[in-house]
Image (cartoon, rainbow, N blue to C red):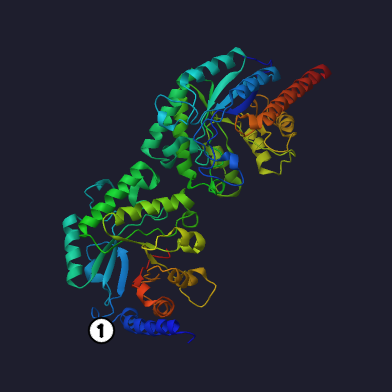
Amino acid sequence: MIRNKDGKIWAFLLHVSFNMWEDCLNPEYPYRRYEPYLRVDDLLWEDAIDALAKAGANMLVLDLGDAIQYKRHPEIAVNGAWTVERLETEIKKLRSLGIEPIPKLDFSSSHDTWMGEWSHMVSTPEYYSFCRDMIDEISDIFCHPRFFHIGMDEESVRYQSAHQYVVQRLNGEWWNDFFHLKECVDSNGSRAWIWPDYMLWNQYFVFNRPGQFFVKMPKDVVQSNWYYSEEFDPINQNIQGYLDLNAHGFDQIPTGSFHRDNTANFGNTVDFCSKHIDSDHLLGFMQTVWMPTTEEYRWRIMESISLLGNAREKYYKRCSYKKQSK
Amino acid sequence: MSSRRDFIKQASALVIAGCLAPDLVVGTAKSVAGQGNGKVRAVATDLCPEIAESLPPGVNMAVLFLDNHVQWAGHPEVSHQGSVSQDVLSNILNSLRSKGIEPIPAFNFSAAHDMWMGKYSRMLSSKPYYSFCKDLIAEAIDLFGRPRFIHFGMQDEGWEKQQNRDRIIYRQDKLWWSDLYFYISEAMGRCVRPWVWADSFWKDPDLFLKMMPRNVLLSNWSSTGSFADPADISVKAFGLLDAEGYDQIPASPSAVISNRTVTYCSETIHGEHLLGFISNARLND
């Protein structure tokens, strides 16, 4: 494990499964449609992991979805899904390179196409059992990891406008399911990690129930607020989210992405958040690309890793300059 | 009159309007059962024990939304506390028939109106859901002694009618159609004709005409209750559906069938495709 002196996390999110968006073709984003086969090219996977190690990344979040032949729920696996043994091999390899593997399953109803039929049973006893089975099995495979990312982002009708099956939980319905998932993670000795956008951003502008997020969200849940543009103006609610989470004492792993023409996003995320989030609550940063791990997207994936490396290097240079100047 | 076809259309419209409107709109008991034109004069309502006594005069069909109001043998878990037993239901059906009223079973399978299903309303388009729907359709058809029609509701499915709820669920595009075909096939496999509210036409008329089988009986209605705006898709729908050869039972979103509905539809829909009229006080809820 690469332990920076300041203990910061430099994470990258890679997709093993990419069935987290439309359950049908959305002409605007054709690559996001559900596909019944694995979308991971092995050579790119290996190159990406090697590049991550070289770039100083010390954590890889694996979005697993339906890409594994789970023992308890083999019915959701896509064609060509990794066996559990293959996943264990990859986990070992990551650890040998100093990269901490962290599992992710997105339980947002906007991103649960990977569940197959279970995504049509949200908030039923059958669904709760499924979620528990999945978290238990993956926690075992990862030997009870430090964190378990449960997604929970973008849960709204707006983000499902092109879906065939639309589900949105709100207020008590959302919190009830969130707490079930958190309890599943807690009982495996891991710490729940989420994208907070849905309940965080909505409390400002949509539902007119101020404070719901900060009143209900437990402090031990790690928050990855995200923002993907290049200008960081706190007037933007997404940016304000970083400041509010900090003011309320949440631990954060701010997240950037290089899925469009936004090369400066991750570097600016690191700059802005390291200035405005208390170091104790800033656990680190995460970069991603929101594309399948396939050769078609090699350049973008490799470039985003290199952007992570550059931002990290700049961050530590700035830290050492500060120390020297003191 | 531009053509013989229009003349026949308008003449038959006048006959139909003349036969139906006085009884149904005014609500008198005059020649209730003896209209002699074979047109349906229906009321859509939830099933309750007193239904046979509470229908307005002139009605010859009761479309009974059974939902969770019956003690279902196959799915007792969805029946509410005051639901009627199968014996009581049988008495209700006999009582209706003795009054010359044809009972028709109905369920509302629209995701906007399916809270009655309990947990099944949270698992649309899944194996347990299909099994549940199949069981209820079969049981209802048996209880009604293979009725002429079975109504599946299906109105209002989308975000609009659920926007104030803490849980929103609905189906779109192919999935909505696929589930509709499932209900239809369950009915037709038992030689019963499916019937739905036709408001899904308003959103995408071309798709509707492409997808909706011609043997499904349709009940469209004017969303405003006014027939004044010729551009209103809910009004235009009557004529467009008629031109495509659908059989229709136009609906009034009110306790009784409105005069305007009868007059407009009798003028717009060919006699052989106009099977009658239906009132549903809760259609715009």
Horizontally, is B275 left or right of A59 in the view?
A: left
> Residue farthest to the bottom?
B1
Q: Residue at x 39, y 82 (%)?
A: B13
In front of the other: A46 or A179: A46
Q: Residue at x 54, y 34 (%)?
A: A151
A295 or A16, nearer to the observer:
A295
* Nearer the observer, A301 or B79: A301
The residue where tag 1 is placed is B30
Which quadrant would residue B62 be assigned to in this image?
Answer: bottom left
Q: Residue furthest front?
A: B4
Q: Report crowding for label 1: few under 14, some 14 to 19, many 20 or more residues within 10 A (C-alpha).
A: some
Rendered-image quadrant of the N terminus of chain A: top right
Q: Amino acid at mark 1?
A: Lys
- In the visual, does A158 lie left or right of A259? left
Residue B252 position (above or below residue A115): below
Question: Residue A67: where, in percent of width, then height?
Answer: 50, 28
Q: Position of residue B150 (x, y in %)?
A: 30, 60
Quarter of image, res B32: bottom left
Report helix, strand or loop for mark 1: loop
Query: Residue B22, how many percent across, how many down?
Result: 33, 83
